[in-house]
Image: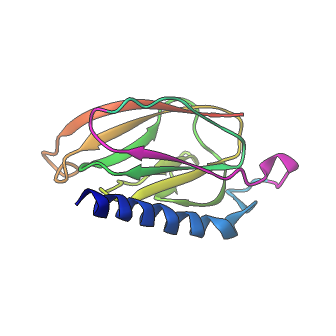
Amino acid sequence: MKLAKNSMVALLVSCFCFTLLPLRGNPVQGAEVTDDMKFGGSRIINITSDEMKLRPVTVESGTTVVWLNSSRRIMELIFTDKQVMTACGSPVNFFVNDSGSYSSNKIVPKATASLCFIEKGEYAYELVFRSVKGFGPGGSVKKDYKGKIVVK
């Protein structure tokens, strides 16, 4: 059973990485292409349980950060300080909100969300976990976890 779960995670990550290859240097949301916007690869944050510790992740400009929801709960990613206004490629499971910054959709178990960071700085975020029934009326927040992406 554990081997099957690990194989499923590896397959999801592999499929996702292949979708990133054609997105190199393809900025969206009105950004001008400059030399510092080169594709920086990807970094995967595997969310495995409700008792995790999110360490700060430091990446180069142009790196795509992938959040893989390996937990059993629905999660949502919320940037709490500096907002992501420009991204390269095509963000997965994110949308541009009314204020012009990126917000995540609900990320169901075994799904991913990804965002390519261009602008340097520190992006603090929270992962809000809810029960599978928890985003409607009467839903319950299980836990919130804080993380940070540092773009050099």
Image location (x, y in percent) of residue 140: 17, 40
| Residue at x 38% of width, y 29% of height | 53
Task: Classify residue 17 by image quadrant.
Answer: bottom right
Task: Give the farthest residue toward the right.
Answer: 35
Using the rendered image of the protein, determine whether residue 91 is visible from the camera's viewpoint: yes
Relative height, residue 63 to residue 148 (above, below):
below
> Where are the magenta residues, as a range?
32-51
Quarter occupied by the N terminus:
bottom left
Task: Classify residue 29 by image quadrant.
Answer: bottom right
Task: Give the farthest residue toward the front.
Answer: 3
Relative height, residue 152 to residue 105 (above, below):
above
Image location (x, y in percent) of residue 62: 71, 49
Image location (x, y in percent) of residue 80: 48, 31
Q: In this view, does 31 lie to the left or right of 21?
A: right
In-front residue for pair 29/3: 3
Does the magenta portion include 35?
A: yes
In-front residue for pair 33/101: 33
| Residue at x 15% of width, y 49% of height | 137
Q: In this view, does 98 lie to the left or right of 63?
A: left
| Residue at x 21% of width, y 36% of height | 142
Using the rendered image of the protein, determine whether residue 98 is visible from the camera's viewpoint: no
Task: Give the farthest residue toward the left.
Answer: 138
Image location (x, y in percent) of residue 95: 50, 56
Task: Classify residue 119 by image quadrant.
Answer: top right
In-front residue for pair 98/145: 145
